[in-house]
Image (cartoon, rainbow, N blue to C red):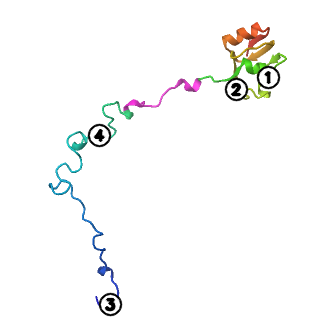
């Protein structure tokens, strides 16, 4: 090229050695021939693995339900749980225990069903009103001289 000639796009060339030719797999023994980087034998060597194949295990698309449908989970009743030892802490002198007093003391959240469970012991007489009781809770409250009433 002459010194005064401006540089043109068609004069540009890549630096020597920067452009390597593409490896042509499976075209003879010289370079990546024969098995073409797939190893020997086996399913993957033969290129026949279907999409979603899990090795004979029932595939995910067959394990999941085909149509959306009915579920009883929507009708499950969930309770706020209060144990007897917690009632003993909140009401050491005894007295009436209602859902409203439990909400006021921070034992349960408001507008929720409350269930009293029998974990722990109680020594004072409590008149407990709640939505549900465990069998052991009823027995322990009655043994302490209290009463139970379900809402």
Which numbered mark, 3 or 1, is in the foreground of this view? 1
| Alpha carbons under labels 4 and 3: distance apart | 59 Å
Q: Is residue 48 magenta?
A: no
Q: Earlier in the sequence, mark 2 or mark 4?
A: 4
Q: Quadrant of residue 133?
A: top right
| Alpha carbons under labels 2 and 1: distance apart | 19 Å
Magenta segment boundaries in residue numbering: 62-75
Task: Give the x, y percent position of residue 140.
Answer: 73, 10
Which residue does the numbered mark 2 point to in the structure image? 112
Which numbered mark, 4 or 3, is in the foreground of this view? 3
Which residue does the numbered mark 1 point to in the structure image? 90
Which residue does the numbered mark 3 point to in the structure image? 5
When the figure is inspected, residue 151 is found, relative to residue 19, above or below; the finding is above
| Alpha carbons under labels 3 and 1: distance apart | 97 Å
Which residue does the numbered mark 4 point to in the structure image? 50
Q: Earlier in the sequence, mark 4 or mark 3?
A: 3
Task: Give the x, y percent position of residue 92.
Answer: 82, 19
When the figure is inspected, residue 148 is found, relative to residue 48, above or below; the finding is above
Which numbered mark, 2 or 1, is in the foreground of this view? 1
| Alpha carbons under labels 2 and 4: distance apart | 51 Å
Task: Give the x, y percent position of residue 58.
Answer: 35, 30
- Answer whether labels 3 and 1 touch (C-beta < 8 Å): no
């Amino acid at each position: 090229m002459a010194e005064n000639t401006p540089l043109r796009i068609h004069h540009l060339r890549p630096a020597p050695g920067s452009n390597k030719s593409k490896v042509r797999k499976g075209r003879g023994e010289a370079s990546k021939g024969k098995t073409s980087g797939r190893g020997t034998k086996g399913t993957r060597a033969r290129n026949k693995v279907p999409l979603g194949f899990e090795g004979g295990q029932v595939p995910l698309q067959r394990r999941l339900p085909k149509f959306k449908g009915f579920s009883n989970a929507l009708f499950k009743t969930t309770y706020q749980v209060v144990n007897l030892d917690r009632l003993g802490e909140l009401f050491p002198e005894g007295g009436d225990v209602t859902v409203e007093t439990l909400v006021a003391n921070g034992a349960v959240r408001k507008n929720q069903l409350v269930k009293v469970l029998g974990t722990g012991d109680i020594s004072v007489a409590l008149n407990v009103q709640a939505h549900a009781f465990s069998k052991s809770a009823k027995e322990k409250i009655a043994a302490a001289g209290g009463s139970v009433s379900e809402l």
